Amino acid sequence: MKSKKKVSGFLIFTWIFLLLFTFWTLFPFFWGIITSIKSPGEQYSTAFLPHFQFKPSSYAWQVVLGQAEGERTKQGLRNSVLISSLSSLLVLFMGALAGYSLARFRFHRWKNKDIAVWILSNRMFPPIAVAIPFFLIMRTLRLLDTLPAIIMAHVVYNLPLAIWLMIDFFRELPEEIEEAALIDGCSSFQAFLRIALPLSLPGIIAVYILCFIFSWNEFLFVVTLSYRKTMTMPVIIAGALTVRGLDFWKVSALSLLAVTPPVILAALTSRYLIRGLTLGAVKE
């Protein structure tokens, strides 16, 4: 009887926690949708139920997608997609090679652990510490306000995390399979391409999604290295702050547009994302 009471209490606590977590997660989306279909005059409504007692309006969407600012919004979305996709691909390529090397080969001049810690230490710098050197380098190379400049900055910033995750993913793979491939005549690079990469596919996809999200949300490098052509969605959203105050209706509409691509990507690859992030979590 006591066991049943304990189980019932645990279930009730679990359901309450899940409901609160669901509310905590979904309410910002609900608030954003409601605010984006309110007219600017109703943003500060004193109605008893302000989220339900209002007259729907498409004003915010007409502004952010219309002739006045539509082209800027589309350019921001296009830049965000290009920068996040390309920088994540480059990070994945270099991170996989570096992670596999540190997981499978032993370096003699410096220990593998020291190299890995040095790589991770580069990720511990706050972005502002490297923003000014990046600006000076890109200005010297005449790459300010160009996509390659932003992509290179995001690659440098996300690469340490990708390498560390890749090291763990490759270490979890049984070495015997690759050794068998080497005995059959494969080179080390062929064993990496044909054996290690396919087996670590969930982890690779998880790393790509994490890098994509970090790059998508990155703000400081874009502000530092661009001023017109390469603005991304986070910078455009921050531009909603005017001398009149914050235009919540515009922020809501732009934020909903900005979160849509990462949410769709995460939803489509959620199976691989969960497998990749939990790879190696359970050890025998």
Image (tube, rainbow, N blue to C red):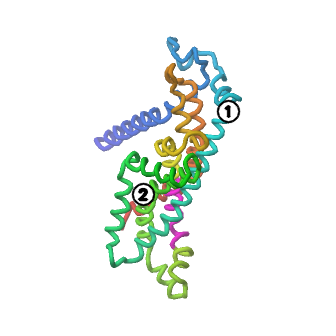
Helix, strand or loop under label 2: helix
Q: In the image, is residue 206 part of the stretch drawn in magenta? A: yes
Give how far apart the Cα atoms at labels 2 and 1 are.
35 Å
| Residue type beneath disc 2 | Leu
Q: Is residue 271 visible?
A: no
Q: Residue furthest left?
A: 2
User: Residue 262, position in %: x, y?
Assistant: 56, 45
Q: Which quadrant: the N terminus?
A: top left
Location of residue 140 with respect to 70 vertically, above or below: below
The quadrant of the rendering that contains the C terminus is bottom left
> Can you identify the residue that label 2 sits on?
161
Q: Position of residue 43 (x, y in %)?
A: 54, 18
Q: Residue furthest right?
A: 67
Which residue carries the number 1 mark? 70
Instruction: Please tell me which residue lies in front, 105 or 195.
Output: 105
For this view, does 259 lie left or right of residue 68?
left
Residue 218's place in the image compared with 159, above or below, is above
Residue 179: % across, % down: 47, 83
CB atoms of marks 2 and 1 within 8 Å: no
| Disc 1 element | helix
Q: Locate residue 118, reporting x and y percent.
A: 34, 63
Displayed quadrant of residue 98: bottom left
- Image position of 64 (left or right of 12): right
The relative height of residue 225 versus residue 108 in the rendered view (above or below) is: above
For the residue carrying disc 2, how many other residues have a C-alpha within 10 Å: few (<14), some (14-19), or many (20+)? some
In the image, what residue occupies the spot 64% across and 44% down? 78
Q: Nearer the viewer, residue 250 or 186?
A: 250
The magenta stretch is 196-209
